[in-house]
Image (cartoon, rainbow, N blue to C red):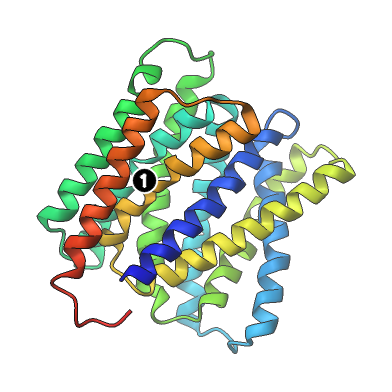
């Protein structure tokens, strides 16, 4: 179980770094183009991973399930990238923390996983930390005119992301993980091609290099996340998503000069506390289970 936790934390760090880099280009390129280039670059890296691991040809069931996930991945990526263009980084990440609640909910409804009191309490603690950090900002009236659409996009992203991760959990123990990551990049690339061509802005050489890095971060992060979900239940990994806020604080300072205040540190402490509480409680009844 702890191996899955560490994998999920590192994966969230890589994906949070990707989000920060995406935000840095939202003022120069349309959302659909950013999403297309991110997945096009990811397809190259995922193809290399597939060539190295050689998992064999996918089964029909694998194609169907991962094709369905591709649609959810497109919805998640486009709506979240749009939210990043309209909202501050901390607020966008804070709103995205609704997804762990949906992960736990969908894990119980779809995968028949048990959602016990420890998980519910940890989710509540994490939510309290989120509200402590961003609650005042969200209600402070400081957003620009596009913020309402940005908030709505972030909420849609939280739901679709949760559903995509639950489907990942359902397939992570059946399909080769490199195959899952490959479809997660190739499918969205094809789905986004028409929209990206309609709004295309020719990238500079420097930005093309940045999009190559974005693809690498996305593939590495989602591969580690797939490994984590192959080792632990979706509901038990849900609170780990809150650690993305810690990563967001670090990258927000490094890239955008955002200096976190006392409420940010207190909220982050609650989030970490909730995560540790869940994992310590989860280890006791499953001590004999292998990672």
Q: Is residue 230 left or right of residue 284?
A: right
Q: In the figure, 90 relative to 70: above or below?
A: above
Regarding residue 193, the answer to whether it shows in the image is no
In this picture, residue 266 sits left or right of residue 181 = left
Q: Whole-percent x and y of residue 33?
A: 71, 43
Picture coordinates of residue 212 (x, y %)? 75, 55
The residue to which callout 1 is attached is 242
Quick one: quadrant of the C terminus? bottom left
Q: Is residue 265 above or below residue 67?
A: above
The residue under the point 30% across, 28% down is 131
Pick the front one: 235 or 10: 10
Residue 262's place in the image compared with 46, above or below, is above
| Quarter occupied by the N terminus | bottom left
Q: How many marks?
A: 1
Choose between 10 and 153: the one closer to the eye.
10
Are there few (<14), some (14-19), or many (20+) residues within 10 Å of tag 1? many
The residue drawn where x is 27% and y is 54% is 276
What residue occupies the far right of the structure in this picture? 205
Q: Nearer the viewer, residue 34 or 272?
A: 272
Q: Position of residue 189 (x, y in %)?
A: 66, 57
């Amino acid at each position: 179980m702890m191996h899955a936790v560490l994998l999920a934390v590192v994966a969230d760090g890589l994906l949070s770094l990707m989000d920060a880099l995406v935000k840095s280009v939202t003022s120069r390129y349309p959302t659909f183009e950013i999403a297309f280039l991110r997945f096009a670059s990811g397809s190259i890296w995922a193809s290399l991973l597939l060539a190295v691991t050689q998992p064999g040809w996918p089964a029909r069931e694998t194609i169907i399930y991962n094709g369905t996930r591709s649609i959810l991945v497109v919805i998640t990526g486009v709506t979240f990238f749009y939210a990043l263009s309209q909202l501050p980084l901390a607020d966008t990440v804070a709103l995205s923390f609704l997804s762990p609640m949906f992960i736990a909910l969908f894990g119980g409804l779809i995968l028949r996983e048990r959602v016990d009191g420890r998980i519910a309490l940890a989710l509540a603690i994490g939510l309290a930390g989120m509200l402590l950090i961003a609650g005042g900002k969200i209600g402070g009236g400081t957003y620009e005119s596009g913020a309402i659409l940005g908030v709505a996009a972030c909420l849609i992203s939280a739901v679709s992301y949760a559903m995509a991760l639950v489907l990942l959990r359902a397939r992570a123990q059946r399909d080769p993980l490199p195959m899952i990551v490959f479809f997660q990049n190739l499918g969205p690339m094809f789905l986004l091609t028409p929209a990206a061509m309609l709004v295309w802005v020719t990238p500079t050489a420097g930005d093309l290099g940045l999009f190559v890095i974005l693809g690498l971060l996305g593939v590495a992060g989602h591969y580690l996340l797939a490994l984590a979900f192959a080792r632990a239940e979706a509901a038990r990994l849900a609170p780990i998503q809150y650690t993305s806020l810690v990563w967001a604080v670090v990258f927000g300072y490094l890239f955008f000069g955002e200096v976190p205040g006392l409420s940010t540190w207190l909220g982050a402490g609650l989030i970490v506390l909730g995560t540790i509480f869940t994992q310590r409680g989860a280890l006791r009844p499953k001590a004999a289970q292998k990672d």
